[in-house]
Every structure is written in C-alpha cells, then in structure tokens.
Amino acid sequence: MSEQNTDARGTLSRRTVIKGAAWSIPVIAAATAIPLAAASTTAPSRPTKPAVTCGSTAAGDNGSYTVDGERVIVSYDSAPDIYELNAHFVDGTSASYGTNYATAPAQGSRQWSVETGKPVSWAQVHSFNTHYQNGVCQ
C-alpha cells in the first residue's frame, strides 16, 4: 500500500507534514543537547606545582614566603617599612603589590597573603634576598 504525499494541487498533505514534524522533534532535541553537553564538560586540570617556601635568616631574609600556585604568603620576622611583592606569571605578564599599589596589609603586620589570580613563575619580596623562580628558591 502506498501513501500519497501530495494532494491534487501538488501541495503536501497534512499527514505528511505532521509525520515530518514528528520525526524532526528527536533530531532537534539531540542537536540542542550536544552543545549543552559540550559546554558542561570540565576542562582537564592543569598540573599544579607543589607549594615552595623561600627565605631564611642565613640568607639575610626577613622571614620566609611561600609561593602556592596563585598565592604568595609572606611571614616577616619583623614588620617591614614597606610591603612590596613583584611577581611574574606563567603567561608572561607581571604585577606589583604592596604599599605603593594600595594592596599592602596594615602597617606593622607580620603576615601578608597576596592572591595574584595567575600562576606565579617568579617572585621577589622587599627585604628578602632570596627569589622564587619556576619552583626553586634562589
């Protein structure tokens, strides 16, 4: 038994249009679900370097500081006259933080945590002779 897809005037029959629409619903649903699924996948995580602590009294440093990914935590033996951290990042950019950049802790603080927002590749802290570079204290 064969079905006619057009009427006498050569236009599509209602039955043909409804069948076509019924078949297109799963196709449209699948097509819209694919981009949503792709957008919801988690990007592979970047391997993180372990936290590294630099600084020592023997090196003439005023305490120590720890570089932990996108954060530098400074512990001073005595509060410095000026707080300053210069950092270079994995993406090739750099930034400075501290007294002259309105990002210093309260004067007299012996602890300072700086959130850089980017992975640190090099760091220098004012009143420290030791520098951090690519996972190593120098």
Image: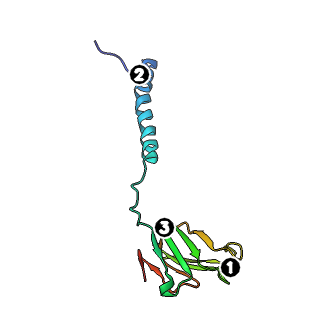
Q: Which residue is mark 2?
A: 19
Give 132 or 100, whichever is nearer the viewer: 132
Give 36 or 14, whichever is nearer the viewer: 36
Question: Would residue 78 appear left or right of 118 to someone viewing this image?
Answer: right
Where does residue 51 sit, x and y in percent of width and height?
A: 45, 67
Question: What scheme was used to colour the molecule?
Answer: rainbow
Q: Amino acid at mark 1?
A: Thr
Where does residue 107 sit, x and y in percent of width and height?
A: 71, 76
Question: In the rendered structure, which disc, 2 or 3, sits on the residue that comes first in sequence?
Answer: 2
Where does residue 13 sit, x and y in percent of width and height?
A: 44, 20
**Label 2 secondary element:** helix
Q: Amino acid at mark 2?
A: Lys
Q: Which residue is mark 3?
A: 68
Question: Would residue 61 appear left or right of 44 to someone viewing this image?
Answer: right
Q: Amino acid at mark 3?
A: Asp
Q: Residues within 10 Å of mark 1 (few under 14, many from 20)?
A: some
- Of all residues shown, which one is farthest toward the top? 1
Q: How many marks?
A: 3
Query: Tag on residue 99?
Result: 1
